[in-house]
Image (cartoon, rainbow, N blue to C red):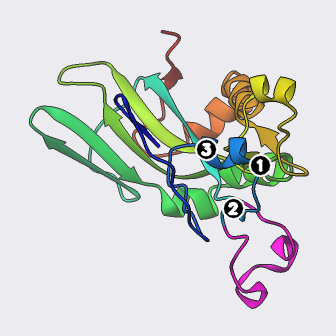
Amino acid sequence: MVWGKERILLEAEVFIDASEDGRLLGLASSAFTVGRGDWPEEFLPPEERGKPLQQAATLMFKVRGVKPGFYKDMFFHQEKGVWGAYGGRETYGKDPEVVSFNNRWGPRGFALKPLNAAQDGPGSQEWWVNCLLIFSVDGRVYGRDREKGLLPLDGCRDVDRAWQEARELLEREEFIAALRRFPGFQEAEISKG
């Protein structure tokens, strides 16, 4: 462990790497489990048994054109001049456009979920949105790690590939059409800045 100029060697039978991306674990080349890999199999869905899957990642992105208001399936609130929003559970589960998007893109590792969003400061026209799930991402491995021989878990994307594929998905008309089905986001456009 390095803290300023001080270095300390730590030894332990179990080390929990709670860093943002598990980078230390990836570089240590030690035995490990990730995500739900240490859960008892009876608690995992059948398709996850025997695989050390990590929790799905999400991509935060900015949009313009959000219309705060009173909606049945979306809650908007304002605090200190900044709007926030959450909800869309019914839209996620029942709207044909959203369901169709998830049926099409889910097997490819992407899905829309009920969203949460926040205005990017008082009076801003831009909103940060969190609603795009990305499955099968090995958060410990970046593209640059391939040169060092570190590869993502079988069937998983590295962080850079996941980010690139998700950004490309944001450009697709079917993505924005599904996003616009959430109340208050009917006129949303992806911010290019």
Residue type at mark 2? Answer: Val
Question: How far apart are the two marked residues, 1 and 3, measured between alpha carbons?
Answer: 9 Å
- Report the magenta residues as a range: 36-53
Q: Residue sitting at 68 percent across and 80 percent down?
A: 39
Ranked by sequence position, the earlier of labels 1 and 3 is 3
Q: What residue type is labelled 3?
A: Leu
75 with respect to 43 (left or right): left
Which numbered disc, 3 or 2, marks the residue that appears first in the sequence?
A: 3
Spot occupied by residue 107 in the image (x, y as percentages of width and height): 86, 52
Instruction: Please give the name of the residue rendered at 79% of the width and 48% of the height, measured from the top-left corner.
Output: 109
Of helix, strand and loop, which one carries label 1?
loop
Residue at figure coordinates x 67%, y 25% from the top left:
167
User: Is the magenta region chiefly helix, strand or loop?
Assistant: loop
Which of the two discs, 2 and 1, sits closer to the camera?
1
Element type where label 2 sits in the image = loop
Mark 3 = which residue? 24
Is 172 part of what is drawn in magenta?
Answer: no
